[in-house]
Image (cartoon, rainbow, N blue to C red):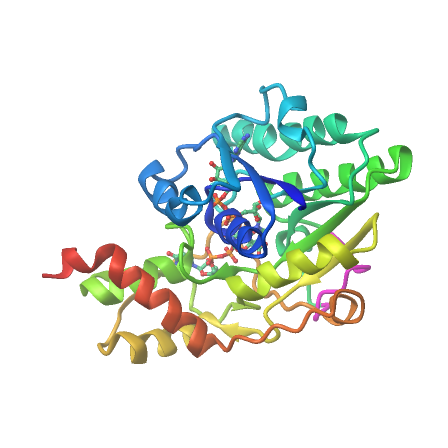
Amino acid sequence: MKRYLVTGAAGFIGSHVSERLIDAGSEVVGVDCFTDYYPREIKESNLERLRSSDRFQLSDADLASAELDPLLDGVDAVIHLAAQAGVRASWGRSFQTYLDCNVRSTQRLLEAVKGRDLDRFVYASSSSVYGQTDDLPMRERGLTCPVSPYGVTKLAAEHLAVLYHRNYGVPTVSLRFFTVYGPRQRPDMAFHRFLKAGLLGQPLEVYGDGSQTRDFTFIDDTVTGIVAALHEGTPGEVFNLGGGGSVTLNHALDVIERLVGRTLDRRYGDQQMGDVSDTRADNSKARRILGFTPETTLEDGLAREFSWVAELYGHQST
Ligand code: NAD
Ligand code: UGA
């Protein structure tokens, strides 16, 4: 039986990855320190199904300071998802948290795994490492020039992963996720906010004129890519995992409007510092090496997220 360490296991992506591994018969050691970026209550509900499995255990520990060796006992592979996420909140004083959770924690974990016999160390990187570019689709070998402090920390940790592979043979694989959505999406992210506002008949704020594009990726597709990387990912390499097609935010809002069955109260505001205009993944490397082919349409994925949002906030609509 394989045993995995999943960091950030109580979060959006980490809870889904852990469930997929448990469902496949593996053991999962989850670690999460329940940062206050969003309520613990939401993270506890992410863990509900996992807590009923005797092959899942969770350690409430901060990767920036905890002793890491005990967490790694008997572990075959690491999936490192823990981070301070959120592009627009990474300016100013909060940058220290981004440094601790994204750079320092990753470096500590890489130090702790060096010399261990691991199958893979999969690191959650981000489309934000590319920054503002007209060179679309984004290719792994293209320029990386982040425009948010968050993107800078995600890229720094990606470089650390490559260094620990080259110098210590840690089998790191970095996956650049593109705006992931679906049930359990973080409450600061666009679709979560928009679906909630649609459900409750509240106004929503669009940053800019809504013409920005994103290669939105449904959570199940991202998880499939992560699991494939555990087996097929080439150590030392970086892979894009995009949803398979970019759309404008305005288009996504139209889809949401049809789903919620009412006109959205769209308030157009200022563009935010750190946001890029467009993301679009070239998935060809992931397709070739990981067999990655995203399958979920935006309509189906948003319908799945809406069901979850309705369950979460439905009681507030009466
Ligand atoms: P999330 O905030 O839901 O999950 C991250 C979890 O990590 C949280 O539960 C948090 O408590 C935990 N954590 C943070 N710092 C920690 C530390 N020092 N020690 C222990 N636990 C810690 O975020 P998510 O959306 O699930 O993102 C997961 C990963 O994927 C992150 O690395 C993020 O940068 C990356 N990513 C996400 C997206 C996306 O669209 N959601 C896109 C690109 C990359
Ligand atoms: C997302 C994640 O939040 C990051 O953690 C991740 O690293 C990044 O994807 C990535 O792909 O690398 P983002 O694309 O900003 O970042 O995702 P959303 O928060 O869902 O925003 C999507 C778009 O909607 C952005 O243009 C944003 O400005 C806009 N938005 C967001 C609004 O117009 N209004 C809002 O209330 C929230």
- 8 lies left or right of 78: left
Of residue 146 and residue 140, the one placed in the foreground of this image is: 140
Check if residue 138 falls in the magenta segment: yes
Relative to 216, residue 313 above or below = above
| Location of residue 208 with respect to 110 vertically, above or below | below
Q: Residue at x 80, y 71 (%)?
A: 288
Front residue of this view, candidates 97 and 32: 32
Residue at 55%, 52% (x, y): give it: 17
Region in magenta: 135-144
Q: Report whether 227 appears left or right of 97.
A: right
Is residue 204 in sight in this rendering?
A: no
- The residue located at (62%, 45%) in the rendering is 151
Q: Main secondary structure of the magenta part?
A: loop
Per the image, is 270 magenta? no
* Position of 248 relative to 147 (above/below): below
Check the picture and name the quadrant holding the C terminus. Answer: bottom left
Residue 259: x and y in percent read: 31, 77
> In x, y percent, where is residue 315?
15, 57
Residue 203: tell me if it is visible: yes
Query: Which x, y percent locates residue 227?
Result: 66, 57
Q: Residue 313: x and y, percent?
A: 23, 56
Q: Quadrant of residue 74?
A: top right
Q: Residue furthest left?
A: 318
| Residue 245, picture quadrant | bottom right
Instruction: Note whether 68 is above or below 134 in the view shown.
Output: above
Image point 64% across, 69% down: which residue?
Answer: 280
Counting labels gives 0
